[in-house]
Image: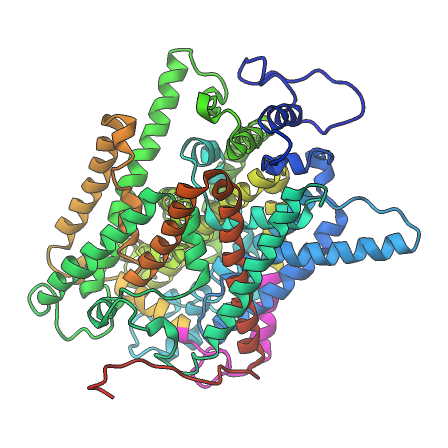
Amino acid sequence: MKPITDQPEQEPEINGSPENALHPYKRLQNQRTSSTDGSNEVQYVEMVYKEKAIPPWTHQLTVRALVVSHALGTLFTVLLLKLRLTTGLIFTPAYMHPGLVGFSCIKTWITIVERCGILGQPFTRQENTMIQVCVLAIARVALNGGIANYIFAMGNSVAKEMPTTEGNDKLNIKEPHIAWIIPYLLLTSFVGLGAMVPLRKFMLIKLKLVYPTGQAIGHLTNCINAPFTTKFARKQFTTLVKFFSFSFFWSGFLWLFTGDIGCGFQKMPLLGWTALKNGFTFDLIGSNVGLGMLLTYNTCISILIATIFCSGFLLPYLRSKSGVWYSSDIINTEDYRGMYGYQDFGGLAMMLGDGFYNVLRVVGVALFHKLRNKYTADDHLQSPPPDDHDQTSPCRSDEQIRTQHFLNDPIPTKLATVAGAALVAISAMLLPLIFRPLKWYHVVAAYMISFVLAFIQAHVVGLCDLILNPAYLDIRAAFVFGAWAGIAQGGVLVGLVACAIMTNFISAAADLMTDLRTSYLTMASPKSVFVYKVIGTASGCIISSMTFWYFENHDRKFGTDKAYYTAYTGQSFRQTAIYGVQGFSGFPKHYLQFWCALFILGIVINVIKDVLPKKVAGYVPNPTALAVAFYVGGRYSVSLCVGNLIVFLWRSRRKDQADAFAPIVASALICGDGLWNLVSNVFAFVGLIDPPWCVQFSRSSET
């Protein structure tokens, strides 16, 4: 879409219809006029921005946005790395509020400049989105670049703290040093960005994955940047502020009663003691309810059904096989040699089946159309024309406008693909120079596996916003690559490097899709998003490495149990790498049959969905949503269903109002809870304020 100017221009033809040939904002105006009687205002989000031109993608790249982004990115990097190195916590709320903070910073700057008599460049929602994208790119390297876990685990200080001396030789140890950390990050942090570019339209337009975090950020950005020229815009902003404030203060109230382990209202037996024992309760967390409001009915019900099956039948059955299929002496609940080997790899197997089928389907359909000469760019991705009874649906019209803009401003797919392939080749040549036991074919194999896992991660995040820690997805690489190399040939180090490469790849791909979902809603250019992602990633490699170097040089006992920056996460990852060199021989009995059955099940469910008529196929559970049950408990699924039920009841009474305001309410609940998590993590960072009280629940007989 081109910016609106005062000069007349030829209107683009969309989908060939005379109505769609109108400029999108004019078409919205016509629909708005024809569908109202003057008493009720049709609730079009994009109509609010009709007076604001959409700047070209080059104008969305501004110096002030880069300055604010790097300042916020540095702040979040320091916070993230300190928390990871001291407590092992994974701090995800940093993903929620850079856009809001950046909006406040630049708005303040513009106000000061204008009062000095200088006319500044207007601040747009597109520029606000770029701040969000760049900050997240910088923070992602600190969170998933491997510095606080895999790279940390390579060092001698961590190896000395291990209960075993296995793998404590020179080939299996690599001391972390800034001289090789920066080149390593620069080599491995960009490949994942190009991996999802060819599939971005399939994921966002064809599958219509919502990416709830990206959607929440997009709605937040639209609301805070909207001009209050219409009643609808003012009502949207008021709704956002109300529920944002409620979620923030409610999360703060719940935090006050979490003063010790096992404390908090999340342990309240609202569904009964038996349900609580199996993990089923309503956790009262606003972000989970808001997340459920954004998900489809099929996704929420699939997760609930699978969670009930896992908690009520599958996991109790596997526990009953303790001492028969696996050793009863295994106490660690995350030991792959015990029941966790079934649970963790079983969920991945079903996701792999789903991802494998979808990738084959995309490639097969594209090749079929190309061979039949019926393929034209993006034709099969264009949004279908609205139904007769839905011609004036506000959400439908907004979606058409956004889809048109998203498809008309593409990222150069060939350039991204070629650049990614070139980086893989360069990494295969240079990484073995940094890590002596690593071979070029290890690097190539790691990237090939990463692509499949990246699709799975992007699919899971888009479906239900479950940010599977990439470590959970790629720690299996330690078993593959560690056993491949062998401990005598540096298998521990090879396994850690392979995991680090895959973590970087997977997280970059999933985060790009989340940012593209945000840009889709804010009408920001996908090209600008990609450019800012590259700039932020490059800066993150430098900032994260320098921050790690600073922490390391200001703690003489760095990496030991007695240090301020302990070896907690490093020890756990190195222990897994040591297990990995043994291969799959230590896994429980019948694990291979269990995994294969779930992999095939993921494919079969997809085949059934494609064979059945569309109306019936909508009731078939989603394989990835079913697999999520292996990683989450009943508490999470109940909260999602509560939010889903709220939207269902709201839509049954006032559909148009629910379509317009339910995403705003959901986004406010998610962002409010995220802001409090940010505040509580700052409290933990400073170390001055702890939750003052503890509330626990028990049976009267146990009291």
Residue 345, above or below 202: below
Q: Residue furthest left?
A: 324
Q: Residue furthest right?
A: 117
For the question of whether residue 80 can be seen, the reply is no
Which quadrant holds the C terminus? bottom left
Tell me how many marks there are. 0
Q: Nearer the viewer, residue 432 or 506?
A: 506
**Boundaries of the magenta span:** 543-568
For the question of whether residue 173 can be seen, the reply is yes
Left or right of 118? Residue 89 is left
Left or right of 626? Residue 2 is right
Which quarter of the figure has residue 165? bottom left
Q: Nearer the viewer, residue 495 or 682?
A: 682
Which quarter of the figure has residue 639? bottom left
Q: Residue at x 45, y 21 (%)?
A: 388
Q: Nearer the viewer, residue 567 or 636?
A: 636
Q: Position of residue 289 (x, y in %)?
A: 42, 57
Q: Nearer the viewer, residue 255 or 346?
A: 255
Q: Position of residue 315 (x, y in %)?
A: 17, 61
Left or right of 174? Residue 594 is left
Residue 578, above or below 293: below
Q: Residue at x 48, y 67 (%)?
A: 148
Asked if residue 497 is among those painted magenta in the image, a careful observer would answer: no
Q: Position of residue 158 (x, y in %)?
A: 41, 75
